[in-house]
Image: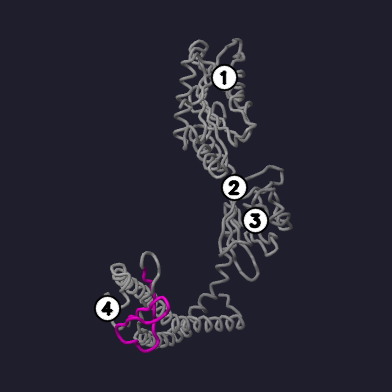
Amino acid sequence: MNRVPREAQDRLANLVGRVALAGALLVAFGLPLVYAGLTYRSHSQLLETVTYVKATAVTGLVSRNPEMWMYQIPRLEAALATHVAGLDDEATLLWDQDGRNLASVGMIPDAPVLSRRQPIFESGRVVGSVEVVHSYRADLYGVSLMLLLGVLSGLFLYAVLKVYPLRVLRRVTAELTGQQERYALAFESAMEGYMLVDSNGKLREVNAALSNLTGYSREILLGLALTDLEVETENRGGTGRDFAGNHCRYETRWKRQDGNLIEIEVTVSRLTQAQGELFCLVRDITDRKRSEETIWFQANFDALTGLPNRRMFLDRLELELKKAHRVNHGVALLFIDLDDFKHVNDTFGHDRGDQLLAEAARRISECVRETDTVARLGGDEFVIVLVELGESQSVSRIAQNILQQLARPFQLGSHTCHISGSIGIAIFPNDGSDGESLLKNADQAMYVAKRQGRNRYCYTAH
């Protein structure tokens, strides 16, 4: 069995001694400090409560007799003597606004003491204060007792930690070599990529799985820095050296030797604080990221037109309304319904109907700015959020342009179709202060446009 050299054992023994001393000091002084902190906090909170209760009682007396209250000493002393469970050895003093003592109850306790003050009011104006003084001497006795107990416990702990751990250390150090061999075997044969990175971000050790993941040989990888593998992303250079604590996890993008990009999740563990060495677990999450992006897109966008769906539209609408509240800009909501779409669907089939919807979405989107939002609510209903409206922004002009674009013929395969649109318009904040009311009013205005003959736009009526 391999044995650790004598010098190493001596260093370990010294380390054990320092740890034992640190533990003993922690117990010896930590116990009374924690006790002192808890008792101080408890009594401070209780003293605040007592002072508040008594100040409230005096404030009530002042409110009932604002002109003569300061001369009603017996009543003031009775209010100051209001008892609150928990504190018995306190003195209560009443001060006027100029710092003169008007009344007091109880004897000032011996030092050390805790004191708290609360103002008293008359018609919202501070006219004095109530001070409660409490002795902290009994708590110091408790702290002294805890200090004695902590010192005795620390001495016992030091003796235990100094003697018995050395036996364990001898056994553990004898097993280190075997463990290192097993760890090396596990490191090399692991299915996931592992690497050891030094304080300069250079790769100092890699396993076979990391070589397979990147396409680089072990020899090439050991000559690279971690940033050499990363492409330009927000996490570029994120080797984990700047994180707080001993662990972190981040996602980035690497370029393989063949030029393909892969999404990577790196879990970093700090091995040594002084030397800055990092042990990293590397996972290929390309498939997972693609699945997440697909799921997110399906949850927020319409598959047919590629436009935001109802959920994404409502989120953007609320966001734009909040922004409009802050900067005092107008927002317009246009509710568009395609006229005669059902006839196209029934006559030429759903595939041609879908083709028409996609083309209509494209035409509508070309009529607005990139900062505006075009969404499909479902069926043949579309909505537009026009933001940052000013004098130069004509909602009517945009609505008319949309009607003209929708009135152009639609070429659906070998068929040419004609439709029109009916548009209802609601303006924030005149036609609604929230998204729900704006959408409702724009919908109603759209139906007014349909009743008036279609192929037109109508504003919300008041």
Residue that badge 2 annotates: 284
Q: Magenta segment range?
A: 92-121
Q: Is residue 55 left or right of residue 312?
A: left
For marks 4 and 3, give the CA distance.
Answer: 65 Å
Residue that badge 1 annotates: 355
Looking at the image, is mark 2 or mark 1 earlier in the sequence?
A: 2
Q: Does dot 3 land on a helix, a strand or a loop?
A: loop
Label 3 neighbour load within 10 Å: few <14, some 14-19, many 20+? some
The residue mark sitting in front, 4 or 3, is 4
Label 1 neighbour load within 10 Å: few <14, some 14-19, many 20+? some
The residue mark sitting in front, 1 or 4, is 4
Residue that badge 3 annotates: 238
Q: Residue at 58% across / 75% down in the picture?
A: 2
Kind of residue at badge 2? Asp
* Residue at the extreme front: 67
Q: As displayed, is residue 431 above or below residue 188?
A: above
Rendered image: mark on residue 81: 4
Q: Does dot 1 land on a helix, a strand or a loop?
A: helix
Q: Residue at 44% across / 33% down in the picture?
A: 437
